[in-house]
Image (cartoon, rainbow, N blue to C red):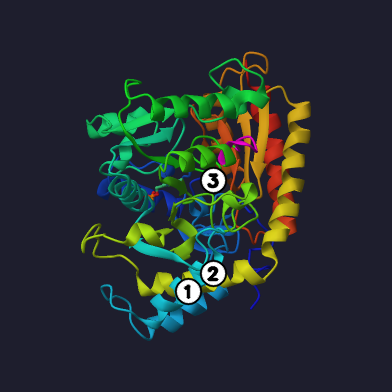
Amino acid sequence: MEVYNLSYDEAPVIKTELPGPRSRIALNEQDMLETQSRTYTRAFKLAVDNARGSTVMDLDGNIFIDWFAGISVLNLGHNNPIVRHAIEEQLEKIVHINEVPTEARINFLKTLNSVLPKELKDHARTMFTVTGADACEAAISLARHVSGKKTIVAFGGSYHGVAGDIVGATANYHYRDYAGISPRDIYHLPFPYPYRFPVNVPEGDISKVVIEQLEYIIRDPAAGPGSIGGVLVEPVQGEGGYIVPPDDFLPMLREVTEKYSIPLIFDEVQSGMGRTGKIWASEHYNVSPDIMCISKSVGGGIPASMISYRADYDRDLPAGFHLGTYRANPLALAAGTAILNYLKTSGILDRVTSKGRYIKKRFEEMAGKNPFIGDVRGLGYMIAAELVRDKNTREPATEMANTMKETLFRHGLLMLTCGHYGNVMRYIAPLTIEDHIIESGLDVFSESLDEVSKKMK
Ligand SMILES: Cc1ncc(COP(=O)(O)O)c(C=O)c1O
């Protein structure tokens, strides 16, 4: 089945004012019916009719290049025949049943087990959940249960979702303030973010500084945070700014958590499913977690999430340890099996690695000529260009990033921001994006950057 050449070839095509007349009506109607707390419609003023590959058509026939893939939910692109076929076949059989085995469920579990990181591969147990946040929530509950200890160590800049207890692990305090709660039994250490590490040490020592602090709070009962029952980390940070830690960080984290028998949880909700050029970002570091959180692209657009964990953690888990009516939707699992098999066998990951290097190089070239791109980083198709007002002070250029997002949109490119200060432009296109669509997108980015830079004071 052809998974490339699905996009609208001519993208981007902007033929009306934005929003176009039909989009404007739909947006106004949405305003009257839906919550004002929506986020994405603040930047992207369009109503969508359909989407193909790495392109999206609005109700007025304008065609946009999609560089955000539903925040990595659509790693094989929109309307991919492999995913569609799997869902359609399953639709004929059954669309919901609670927990009892189906062919879709068993096939998925076997396929997932065959691609897990080396220590989990072929002997993990999986617990289905519903959303990314729910998976992270289940993961910290399991870590606490297994260790018999309460405090979970998470990292600055982390995003693990906005729900229940897990919002306490999500580092940005705004989400907790909105909910009017304080974090419970969570302690944040700085993530090894070379461009903005809070301690002035040589880059080569950053991991060591974080790990020594972790070991101190584990070892010393009077250090403050409490008894450490788990460490939760994104192997490559997503919402925090597409931050790739130094190569020694995850191996050191593994070593210290093993030494003290503390469950190590990898949140691969955004970085997994091929996004970085390997099925899991942690494979770049050859490190396996004890518990892994999986979601987004695993359902191919149908909500799905799960944790996979060491079989010995399963020993005395009571029935109903973690629950949710909608867990393991058969349509999502059928899609997930097809997607995992495709990632495993098609060679697409090699393409993401080489193309990702090329795209990163193109951003670096732009950074060389532009005073406002302070840092370019990334792995595979998880690439960041961090905007600053001044390359020496590294003052975040948040407004510029917002203006970039709006300008790119006007020129037909959908791109999101992220980062501690919302000043990071992130490339997170479908892994199937065609060469000529990449080039068109880079042209739009480069021209928009020039346009916005001219207006910077
Ligand atoms: C790394 C990571 N973990 C967890 C989540 C939460 O997932 P959800 O929005 O499905 O709850 C996200 C969402 O972006 C994420 O990027």
For residue 222, above or below residue 437: above
Residue carrying label 2:
114
Specify whether residue 55 is painted magenta.
no
Q: In this view, does 381 lie to the left or right of 128?
A: right
Image coords of residue 7 (percent x, y) = 63, 64
Q: What range is drawn magenta here?
A: 244-250
Q: What's the residue at 32%, 49% (across, down)?
A: 146
Residues at circles 3 and 2 in contact by the CB criterion of under 8 Å? no
Residues at circles 1 and 2 in contact by the CB criterion of under 8 Å? yes
Image coords of residue 111 (percent x, y) = 51, 72
Q: Residue 377 carries which label?
A: none
Identify the amino acid type marked 2: Ser
Q: Which of marks 3 and 2 is nearer the N terminus?
A: 3
Could you classify mark 2 by the number of other residues whose Cα lies within 10 Å: few (under 14), some (14-19), or many (20 or more)? some
Residue carrying label 3:
17
Picture quadrant of residue 197: top right
Which element carries disc 3, helix, strand or loop? loop
Asked if residue 129 can be seen in this view, the reply is no
Q: In this view, does 5 lie to the left or right of 314?
A: right
Identify the amino acid type marked 1: Lys
